[in-house]
Amino acid sequence: MQSRLDKSPVATWWWTIDRWFLAAFLSLMGLGIVLSFAASPAVAERIGLDSFHFATRQIIFTVPALGVMLAVSFLDSRQIRRMALIMLCLMLVLMVAVLYIGVEVKGARRWVSFAGLSIQPSEFLKPAFVIMCAWLFAEHKRQPDIPGNLFAMLLLVLVVSLLVAQPDLGQTMLTTGTWGIMFFMAGLPWLWIVALGAAGVGGVFAAYTVFPHVALRIDKFLTGEGDTFQVDMGRDALINGGWFGVGPGEGTVKRVIPDSHADFVFSVAGEEFGLIMCFFIMSIFAFIVLRGLNTALKEHDDFTRYAVGGLVTVFGLQAVINMCVNLQLVPAKGMTLPFISYGGSSQIAIAISMGMVLALTRKRPEKRKQMGFGLSQRAVPAE
């Protein structure tokens, strides 16, 4: 335990960090490891690997993810912006490169490999994109003559164009939705709300028309016809589990779902640990999003408000999409459950995002001192 009299960086960090956020993130990481041991052995055995291959790798991914999250949480807002700018430039280059040298999986190029490591640039692009848009919105509000909103729109167009080119329409919708919410927080006029809503509807219709796999998924969702094996099994797993589950390791659906350790880990949790576990997981995500939005609402600094709001929004939307796919409430879309689903790029990228949230929501003693000094000065009557 650190003493309040200790002025070292670690002690200062401990007394200024939002421990509720930290506890929630650590809980999700721990659940990810536990559920990996429950969901992944059947997948590993089915493809001829050691039973705990994916579970071991989940732990290997979680350790550096935790380190990255804690390291980022030590930064101040200016360092966060600089880090985001570097990440944004680097990931935009990789997003272009992935179109030419990326690994093609199921007709999409989203991964690029370096020295045996596979990276999904779009995962790392999201937090950098949110931070830079938050800065642009804040600068425009601080000085209206600065075309921050226009630059944020141009950045959105660039990012969306690269995502559609892969194609990755799930990340496109996630990024666009988050950007829209941030723009709304920044004082979006109602005319813009109508225009962006119409553009969103038009984008969905265009995706349905242009991309056959999108049309197929939407048609299968609406009609229930065609190959709906994974989503049907995911839903059945939740039904089979009931309130309290069939017991750890006793689930059967995970033995036939190809992505039970990744996109459908929520269904495995429901079958083996019951709906009680599902509600517990949902409550952690809801707590993070609501606490983040509440903190952003109380924040006086525009950049911090938009950044925290955007980061918890993209975090929450990704979780909602994953869980809704498992519940067969939306068309099937491969998207990880933050901190819980198996995946190296996703783990590290989400850790960076939540490290930024921890950094931006820290209590800054120097700010309190400055505010107190200002109040005392104003309290002195003029002679």
Image (cartoon, rainbow, N blue to C red):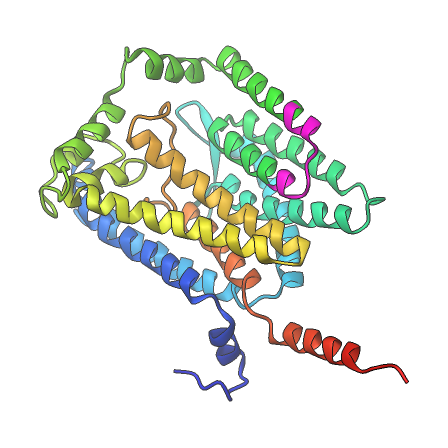
Q: Is residue 213 above or below residue 155?
A: above
Extreme residue toward the right, this view: 383
Q: Is residue 135 magenta?
A: no
Extreme residue toward the bottom, this view: 5
Question: Could you say which quadrant of the image residue 336 lies in?
Answer: top left
- At a point 38% along the width and 31% down the height, the residue shown is 334
Find residue 348 and report its horizontal and vertical position in percent.
44, 52
Q: Nearer the viewer, residue 340 or 372?
A: 372
Question: Could you say which quadrant of the image residue 318 lies in?
Answer: top left
Quadrant into which the C terminus falls: bottom right
- At a point 30% along the width and 26% down the height, the residue shown is 328
- At a point 37% along the width and 25% down the height, the residue shown is 330
Quadrant into which the N terminus falls: bottom left
Q: Nearer the viewer, residue 69 or 144?
A: 144
Q: Nearer the viewer, residue 200 or 207?
A: 200
Q: Is residue 188 magenta?
A: yes
Find residue 202 and report its horizontal and vertical position in percent.
58, 17
Q: Is residue 276 above or below residue 188?
A: below
Find residue 106 and report its horizontal and vertical position in percent.
39, 24
Span of residues in magenta:
182-194
Drawn side of residue 186 relative to residue 232, left or right: right
Find residue 102 and report its horizontal and vertical position in percent.
50, 34
